[in-house]
Amino acid sequence: MAAAALDNANPTILSASQLPTRQKKTAPRLGPDSRFGDLIFSKPSYFSQPLSVDDLKAVSWPKLNSYEDDFASDPIDEQEIYDLISTISDPEHPVSLGQLSVINLPDIHITPSPSLGAPSPNTIVQVAVEITPTITHCSLATVIGLGVRVRLEQALPPNYRVVVRCKENSHSQDDQVNKQLSDKERVAAALENDTLKGVLDKMLETCA
Amino acid sequence: MPTSASATTTAERLVALPPLRPDLHERAWFSAPHPTLPLLATVHAKSVTVFSLTTLSSHSNLTGGHTRSVRSAAWKPNLPPHKLCLVTGSFDSTAGLWRWEDEAAASSSAGLEVEVTGRDGDSEKGDQDWEFTLVLEGHDSEIKTCAFSPSGAQLATCSRDKSVWIWEDIGASEADDEWETIAVLNEHEGDVKSLAWCPDVPGRSRPNTYGHDVLASASYDNTLRVWREDGDAEWVCVAVLEGHEGTVWGVEWEGKPRKGSMFPRLLSYSADGTLRVWTLTQQGEGDNDDDDAEQSGTAQARARNPLGGIPNTMRQSLREEWVCTATLPKVHSSDVYSAAWSPVTGLIASTGSDGVLALYKEKDDCSWTLLDSHENAHGPYEVNHVAWCRRWDSGIDSDKRGVEEMLITTGDDGVVRPWQVAVD
């Protein structure tokens, strides 16, 4: 078995311009949409210290407080989640998860819905993302899911709980993958695995 | 008493007390209260911070023993008060053994406890007192929990490698650490998340085929298992407890002695958001004493026949029957990461991913009622652990120190917070 063989050698790739985004047009202005800009656009320093509370305290909290008025009128919505994760690179192909349609806007759900207004900083908000692996036996589904979970946990405030699942029937072992991705302890341990961390670093390099 | 008067006339409430100092500022997984001394070991990243529960601040730090995060810790019980021994279980697949000895206190027997526990925040000095004495290697992947048997003679560790290991110190003296593996238990079909030894309560010692020590394990395979040592000193699984619909994050034994010296029950908590109580089916259930039935050799007593000469394949018939006898009121909306069963009051506390701390009490009909719940116990963060321990600080009357219980929660925010259970 050739080690370099790809699981899916010929995936369908969409052009980046076809993808839904708000990122480009909001980038120049300093509005609420860019309140996590320094997290999103900065070098992913959090990899040296996974899930550091310092980062969250130092960056997210003061921002949340100082933008409280904006926050109230403009909560984090599905598009914002999409913009955070669609730019993650596929571990096999030099294209983004958005271009491969692994991440799709209609498969992102936030509860309570952002249309109800901004949640208080202590309200637990669930972000559910269904990923669609490019082929049903894609062995990298777990790694992709892990990348999505890690990306969101780093970027979102601490009251957001991230749930990443394989879209139903999209993956032959989706129950097993889903269980691993929802296990906090396994996720934490995986991030301390140098090999896996290297793969994740590379995937997240392309995030904005 | 025919009525449950106590349930209606008193109301227990959870009252948050100021967190221990300093904040750890990073995810803390677990806090282990010392069985007798006012000390609490909290694991975070690759180290352990030991807090004094007298001063409610840092006592000492254990660093440099592990290459990955420390997930759990356990105090060795039954040591003299000037000697401390802590075992740490780490994601680096090893367990570390740490010892702390106060030479000065050992020579002057007065005020031992003060010397060991009275330091306030002198962490620099504290660092030098802990010695990393031994690494226990053997597991293939992350160690999730480590736990000492009630006597301290045996240590159990469990791992993502699906196994439980039992270790014994065969060294000539306490300080002479020479640990060997006496059992490797491989029956779980997924990560073994947690372990608990049955405490040494009156109901534990029953005349039967097995040794006194009983170990329970909880797993990613959605089951619990109960393990005992048979007549040939071999550890065997005597029960598989099925019912949870998700990873069983942990298991706790009932520490408060039951009426009629009944065998302690088990509490399990799971990713399915529930907490369940399990009871061993005993002959003459409801009678105070069923020894006669056992000795008379009735059909029901077959499960307690000596194991001698029975081949492995027959052990199935020697299994214990454990039944889920209660499900606690549904409070948590997601994973219950931790629960604690008070050996003093019999109250249960639980916490988890939703950040809720809940307190339950058993009613006379053996169902459970919710006494109080506290949202955002650690603000927006997940709470990883809850434990009962004694209260030693100056915030309560001196005659209650070391007697009254409190709860300790440990969270992703690196905060370690005591909670008073106030009775109105």
Image: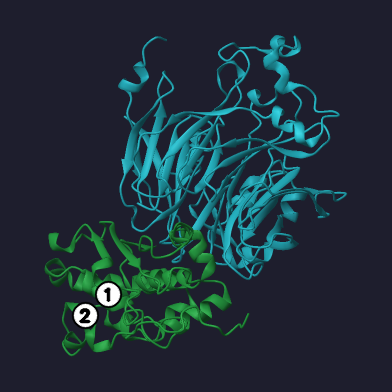
Amino acid carrying mark 2 in the image? Pro
Amino acid carrying mark 1 in the image? Tyr
Residue B312 visible in rendering: yes
What residue is drawn where x is 47% and y is 42%? Answer: B269
Q: Residue B359, image x and y in percent?
A: 38, 37
Number of numbered discs visible in the structure rendering: 2
Quote the CA–CA distance across marks 1 and 2: 8 Å
Q: Residue B57, image x and y in percent?
A: 49, 56
Residue extending farthest to the right is B172
Q: Chain of mark 2?
A: A
Q: Chain of mark 1?
A: A
Residue B396 visible in rendering: no
* Left or right: where B285 falls relative to B332: right
Q: Colour of chain B?
A: cyan
* Left or right: where B328 falls relative to B53: left
Q: Colour of chain A?
A: green
* Left or right: where B173 falls relative to A153: right
Q: Earlier in the sequence, mark 1 or mark 2?
A: 2
Query: Eyeballing the image, is B93 above or below A32?
Result: above
Give residue A85's quadrant in the image.
bottom left
Residue identified by numbered label 2: A20
Element type at mark 1: helix
Residue identified by numbered label 1: A82
What residue is drawn where x is 18% and y is 73%? Answer: A67
Dot label at residue B333: none
Query: Eyeballing the image, is B291 above or below B310?
Result: above
Give residue B97's quadrant in the image.
bottom right
Mark 1 neighbour density, 10 Å: few (under 14) some (14–19) many (20 or more): many
Please report contact status of discs 1 and 2: CB closer than 8 Å, yes or no: yes
Element type at mark 2: loop
User: Please, which colouring scheme is shown?
Assistant: by chain
